[in-house]
Amino acid sequence: MDRRALLLTPALLGLASTGAGAADAPPPNGQAAAPGKADGTGWRRFEVTTRVTLTDPEGTHTGGTNTGGTHTGGAAQLWLPLVQTAGGYQLRQALRCEAGGQAAVVRDAQYGAEVLRVEWAADSPAPRTAEVVQTVATRDRTGGEAALPLTAAERRFWLQPTESVPVDGIVRDTAERIVAGRTAPRDRLRAIYDWVVDNTSRNPDTPGCGLGDVRAMLESGNLSGKCADINGLMTGLARAAGLPARDVYGIRVAASRQFRTLGASGDVSKAQHCRSEVFLEDTGWFPIDPADVRKVVLEHKLALDSEPVSALREQLFGNWEMNWVGYNSATDIELPGSLAGQRPNFAFLMYPCAFTAAGQPDCLDPAHFQYAITAREIAA
């Protein structure tokens, strides 16, 4: 197979303008701390590798026309979310892709989320394969990140509704009831955070990370789900209360120092996780994660008012352990460069997504949509 390689270096990725000072910069490539430990500045480095094989066996696609058998013709496209550079806690340092098709980094028009798109010509043989390696440096995030105030346009953008996160009707009414009598933004945020923690639950049978359909959750009264549901509800209620908010979709890449279930390493193909952040004028973007509180309650069989969960509840209001990397905040995303505004299976791009002549493979069916994601910490 004619394989083509795409290599982007830190210079090409624009890391010279990350906003981190020289004393706060992560160590150069090849000089990361030992596994599980930060260096003197708190930075750690991870290598995240995604391998994808596209085949078209009978009955493996959703949408489109199923031709049956192994597909050997027809164009195909693959989209992979890329790790973003964000504030002073996460920097993407290198990206390498090897594939039999044409690979390019593209951005979605609404959010500016970077995505790797690979295209195969109609006559390219099956299976179509791609391997993408990303190197990212992270350090634990405590409190809000130092940032310039939001512009008026940015504030409007992160307050506006989306298809899956509306801010009117039952969402607005619920938010107003929760924050009634509170005027300080941090107090309003804490009231919403506590309400979400107290009233939601994690459902282990929810496919993937959930749908994140905020209105449906509130209208049904069923406030159970996984991270995209619980943290999506957090984001929707915050916006409805006048607080700019967004989800950050990503994946766990290392073991946790807090709870076993809040980490993953090695094979992280099913370790996707989204978080929430809310803009406060005095701190900038403020990190929260009520979904992980509920994850620990369920998977460790602990009471919500137990001492370990209470401590975690406080920790996750303003802190992220960065054994996780964030991709983007694009909700209800249209895939950049796709035909006729195609979208992924879910309202977000947190899994590999592909389209072939037979349709869109189910990203939660790895037996038929063959991909594997691995993560390792890079030692010195």
Image: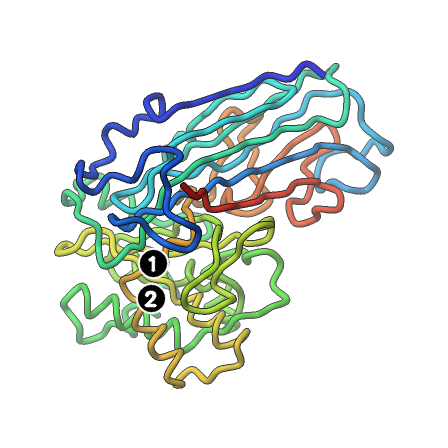
Foreground residue among 118 and 27:
27
Query: Horizontal and vertical percent for residue 374?
Result: 57, 44
Task: Categorize mark 2 by other alpha carbons within 10 Å: few (<14), some (14-19), many (20+).
Answer: many
Left or right: 232 with respect to 185?
A: right
Left or right: 176 with respect to 57?
A: left
Left or right: 352 with respect to 37?
A: right
Colouring scheme applied when the structure was drawn: rainbow
Query: Horizontal and vertical percent for residue 93?
Result: 37, 32
Which residue is found at the position 85% from the left and 34% from the top? 68
Task: Categorize mark 1 by other alpha carbons within 10 Å: few (<14), some (14-19), many (20+).
Answer: many
Quarter-of-image position of residue 173: bottom left
Q: Is residue 192 above or below residue 110?
A: below
Q: Which residue is mark 2?
A: 316
Element type at mark 1: strand
Indicate the amino acid at tag 1. Trp
* Quarter in which the N terminus is drawn: top right
Query: Horizontal and vertical percent for residue 331?
Result: 44, 45
Quarter-of-image position of residue 288: bottom left
Foreground residue among 164 and 21:
21
Q: Which mark is residue 111?
A: none
Query: Horizontal and vertical percent for residue 299?
Result: 55, 73
Which residue is found at the position 65% from the left and 35% from the top? 52
Q: Which residue is mark 1?
A: 320
Left or right: 250 with respect to 132?
A: left
Indicate the amino acid at tag 2. Leu
Badge 1 vs badge 2, beta-carbon distance below 8 Å? yes
* Quarter in which the C terminus is drawn: top left
Quarter-of-image position of residue 120: top right
